[in-house]
Amino acid sequence: MALSFFLMNFLSQQKEEIAKPKAEEIKRYVKTTQVQYNNIPTELIAYGRVNSSLPLDITAEVSGKMLQGDVSLRAGQNFAKGALLFKVDDTETRLRLQASKSSFLKDIASILPDFKIDFAESYPAWQSYFNAIEVDKPLPELPKHKNSQEKTFLATKNIYNAYYTIKSTEENLKKHKVYAPFSGTISEVLMQIGSFVNPGNKIAKTLKTSALELNVAVNPNDIKWVKTGSVVEVQTEVGDQAWKGKVVRIGDVLNANTQALDVFIQVISDKNKIYEGMYLKATMPGSRVENAMEIPRAALVGNEKVYTLQQDSLLSVRTINIHKLNAETAIVSGLQLGDELVVEPMIGAYEGMKVFRLKEEEKTAKNPEKVNNKEDEDNV
């Protein structure tokens, strides 16, 4: 046993040690670009719905039975300016007005003898006025009194009160017919022909189709880029239709629902038809940013920092000035000209980390779909 033990130790000493392979250093490559500054034009993209700038509720001002007008009172019905939308039966009001005019005519006739004696200079005017009165036509304007005595006489005879009562009834009679204030369309009908209406009843809702506006929501931080009067490109989400527009108003009250400011764009519809309620995209030009650079938004570290690559291949965290954030890019400044800016997201990076700049041939190797495969071409 002792001999076996010594023999085993002897043989184990003759065995060569297996060399362990050294761990290969992993090199991390990053994509960079050289910092260069230019004057960069900006634009703001926002979405919203088309609404009429002049929606109008049609209400009844008198009571009575609704009668048919010149257009059919139906949702979707178009009408021209001045068209009779509907009317309210005015038979009772018209008869009452004629009775008042007949009574007024008697009052004028009763004062003519007094005018002939006491106010001879005014008598011809009042005689002509009496002859001009017709019960089925609007009442003519009263002759002007020439002195205070004549004015007092007319007041004591209740001429002024009777005159203005009749003129008020004439104005009320006009309200029995409702005419379109503009050309547009009926969006909703609340009461049908034949219904009995009272003052204040809503009859229909109308829209002025020639005055359509796009209402878009803009973040308060971006409102400084929007200018009233600027020309706007408006298009559908898929881009199959496009229009020109102009910023006409900018709201200064924060919308409680969107927490944004409302910007109103007047849309000019020439070739392509535009409709109320369409959801559209607006591209608004903004001010130019001088001496700035546009970088991928993914290159930002936190809020206002980026990585730059030093000459010794070490990462350095730099604070920058962000002028504007777009959907995929950011317009920034604050770096030195010629700095190597890292333009791709860095996971697990830190200040002083050693990385290597990705060369053009390595970029191509990392994107094999861009390399011409001669063998595949020959096989085809």
Image (cartoon, rainbow, N blue to C red):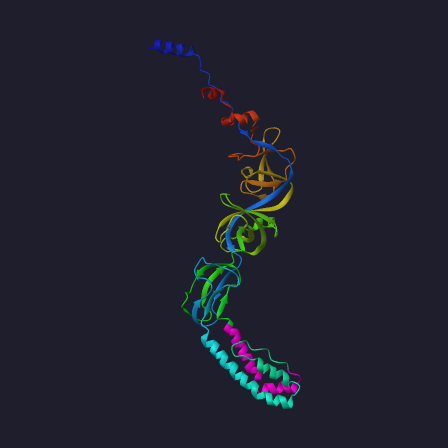
Viewport quadrant of the N terminus? top left
Residue 200, position as x, y percentages in the image: 47, 69
Asked if the stretch drawn in magenta spans residue 41, the answer is no
Magenta residues span 145-173
The residue positioned 48% from the left and 79% from the top of the image is 96
**Main secondary structure found in the magenta portion:** helix
Asked if the stretch drawn in magenta spans residue 149, the answer is yes
The residue positioned 52% from the left and 81% from the top of the image is 101
Up the image or down, 182 lies above or below 62; here it is above
Up the image or down, 150 lies above or below 81; here it is below
The residue positioned 36% from the left and 11% from the top of the image is 5
- Residues 108 and 268: in front is 108
Residue 166, position as x, y percentages in the image: 53, 79
Q: Quadrant of residue 66?
A: bottom left
The residue positioned 35% from the left and 10% from the top of the image is 4
Residue 75, position as x, y percentages in the image: 44, 59
- Residues 25 and 284: in front is 284
Residue 81, position as x, y percentages in the image: 53, 61
